[in-house]
Image (spheres, rainbow, N blue to C red):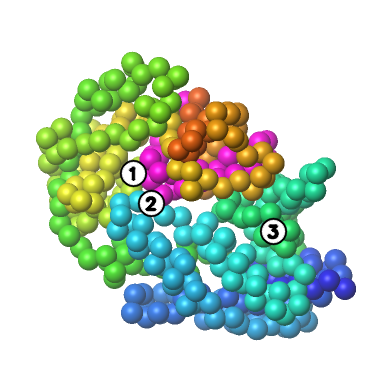
């Protein structure tokens, strides 16, 4: 009998995953990952890990499977939290969830599971895996299009995929809740968790201010008729993808001061909330940040040309292929569908490999391209690779 360690989070998805695995005849062990309990940077009452741990224990008892808690908070702080602070401080937009899967759930947690003699680890992600004819493991989107979480796993390796099971990837969320209800699991009607546990109900800027001190700076509004916008959107040929992938560069002289902010490192491109500037015909969006001068650049409306670009660039060191057999060589290009954030509709694009890295040229403008985000490319419902956006 093969052994599977399930990451029981205290939510309905991992609870049902454990139930299904037991039904399939696996020897199932439930482990709750305790990732954060540093009261110096958040209010412990706002982090529900104690309640989640209790719910996970009750589910394990109901299913009749062994259960234990694994404290990964030290690893989590170094690999995820410190990374997140450093990225924001540098004016980039991190995705801790992607890193958590790569560095914690399918690395530190996987190694701990293997020490227990586990053949696999399982999670409640809405995604699927199978094998191609050549034996390569394929990461596929979950069948519930509204819950597909394959994007969060875009940095996994072939080895990590070989050890992973996703029992609910073929199900709709409604079916998962129905199963939980039929099995009288305490998590059946539990609301889905929002964001990372250690942030809890605290707003992200509030959490960041625990480590990144507030620093007042100017909010500058840019008009739509700047020369660089006009040139980019009307005169640059699509063949010049390197030019199209270059980020816009702003200076305070290009616009007018419309307000103050408490730190450029708290904001990200495409952000609308938190600016506290009113009186404009259209809502203001962040279209650029400069942590060196501590300036935020904004524009009116989500169609502002500074918010929309046709191309992006990923440096060589930040390119990751789940399917190594699809890896592009220098000078090669291929058509894929790409997204740059969770739940963003896939966009048609051409991937172009050069010696310095990977250029992604979209068929239409993409809103809110921000350094630090992960771009993930798909062929139909298979996630082929991903990379951290350089610019």
> Is residue 231 part of the magenta span, yes or no?
no
Q: Position of residue 212 (x, y in %)?
A: 27, 65
Residue at the location (39% across, 67% down)?
82
Frontmost residue, 332 versus 51: 332
Dot 1 and dot 3 residues touching (CB under 8 Å): no
- Point out the stretch of residues depicted in magenta: 364-391
Q: Earlier in the sequence, mark 2 or mark 1?
A: 2
The overriding secondary structure of the stretch rendered in magenta is strand
Q: Which mark is residue 159?
A: 3
Label 2 – label 1 distance at C-alpha? 8 Å
Residue at the location (71% across, 74% down)?
114
Residue at the location (72% across, 47% down)?
138
Label 2 – label 3 distance at C-alpha? 28 Å
Instruction: Choose mark 1 or mark 3, whichever is in front.
Output: 3
Q: Position of residue 25 (x, y in %)?
A: 87, 70
> 10 Å neighbourhood of mark 1: few (<14), some, or many (≥20)?
many
Residue at the disc numbered 1 = 269
């Amino acid at each position: 009998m093969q052994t599977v360690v399930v990451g029981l989070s205290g939510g309905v998805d991992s609870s049902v995953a454990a139930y299904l695995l037991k039904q399939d005849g696996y020897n199932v062990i439930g482990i709750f990952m305790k990732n954060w309990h540093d009261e110096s940077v958040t209010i412990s009452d706002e982090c529900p890990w104690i309640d989640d741990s209790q719910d996970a224990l009750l589910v394990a008892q109901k299913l009749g499977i062994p259960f234990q808690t694994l404290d990964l908070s030290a690893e989590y702080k170094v690999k995820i939290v410190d990374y997140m602070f450093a990225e924001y401080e540098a004016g980039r937009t991190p995705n801790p969830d992607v890193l958590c899967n790569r560095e914690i759930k399918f690395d530190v947690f996987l190694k701990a599971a293997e020490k227990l003699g586990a053949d696999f680890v399982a999670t409640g992600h809405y995604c699927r895996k199978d094998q191609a004819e050549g034996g390569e493991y394929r990461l596929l989107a979950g069948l519930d299009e509204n819950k597909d979480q394959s994007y969060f796993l875009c940095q996994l390796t072939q080895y990590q995929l070989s050890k992973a099971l996703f029992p609910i990837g073929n199900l709709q969320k409604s079916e998962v809740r129905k199963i939980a209800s039929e099995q009288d699991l305490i998590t059946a009607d539990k609301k889905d968790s929002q964001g990372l546990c250690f942030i809890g109900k605290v707003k992200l800027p509030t959490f960041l201010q625990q480590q990144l001190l507030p620093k007042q700076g100017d909010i500058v509004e840019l008009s739509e008729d700047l020369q660089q916008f006009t040139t980019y959107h009307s005169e640059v040929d699509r063949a010049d993808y390197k030019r199209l992938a270059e980020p816009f560069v702003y200076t305070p002289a290009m616009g007018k001061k419309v307000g103050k902010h408490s730190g450029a490192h708290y904001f990200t491109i495409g952000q609308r909330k938190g600016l506290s500037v009113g009186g404009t015909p259209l809502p203001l969006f962040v279209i650029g940040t400069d942590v060196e001068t501590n300036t935020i650049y904004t524009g009116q409306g989500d169609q502002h040309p500074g918010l929309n670009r046709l191309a992006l660039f990923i440096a060589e060191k930040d390119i990751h292929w789940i399917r190594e057999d699809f890896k592009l060589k220098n000078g090669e290009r291929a058509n894929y569908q790409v997204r740059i954030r969770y739940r963003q509709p896939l966009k048609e694009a051409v991937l172009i490999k050069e010696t310095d890295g990977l250029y992604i040229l979209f068929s239409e403008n993409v809103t809110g391209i921000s350094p630090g985000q992960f771009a993930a490319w798909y062929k139909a419902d298979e996630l082929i690779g991903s990379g951290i956006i350089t610019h």
